[in-house]
Amino acid sequence: MRKVIFVLAVALSTSGCVRTAWNVATLPVKAVGKTADLMTTSPKERDEKYVRKMRKEQERRDKECRKHPETCEADGYQGQRLPAGY
């Protein structure tokens, strides 16, 4: 009976140490992965950034066309809009 209690006590007391050792061992790998993720841009992120830029430019042009409709067609814009879904 004492052996069982001793084994259980040792197992419970070392589980925290094992978890801590695992976290310490995997920390550099996680740090490098996070850094690489922050340093690189995925194609999806690049596309989202491009679409945001185009929408902002489109809003600016629309605003200018509302203020000065006579110059709107002179710059070649002619009311073009982004396709649906963007």
Image (cartoon, grey):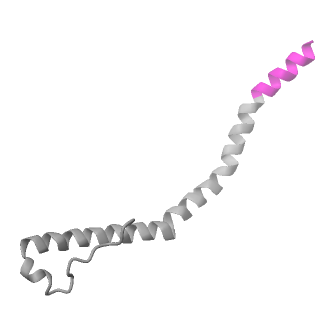
Q: Residue at position x 21%, y 77% from top? A: 79
The image quadrant of residue 58 is: bottom left
**In this rendering, would 79 be left or right of 22?**
left
Find out whether residue 8 is within the magenta segment: yes
Residue 25: percent from left, percent from top: 70, 49
Q: Residue at position x 13%, y 87% from top? A: 74
Q: Main secondary structure of the magenta part?
A: helix
Q: How many marks?
A: 0
Look at the image and tell me whether residue 17 can be seen: yes
Residue 63: percent from left, percent from top: 14, 69
The image quadrant of residue 37 is: bottom right
Given residues 24 and 33, the one toward you in this image is 33
**In this rendering, would 55 be left or right of 9?**
left
Given residues 33 and 78, the one toward you in this image is 78
Image vertical order of residue 24 relative to residue 68, above or below: above
Which residues, given as a range, are shown in magenta? 1-13
Given residues 41 and 63, the one toward you in this image is 63
**In this rendering, would 67 be left or right of 26?**
left
Residue 13: percent from left, percent from top: 76, 26
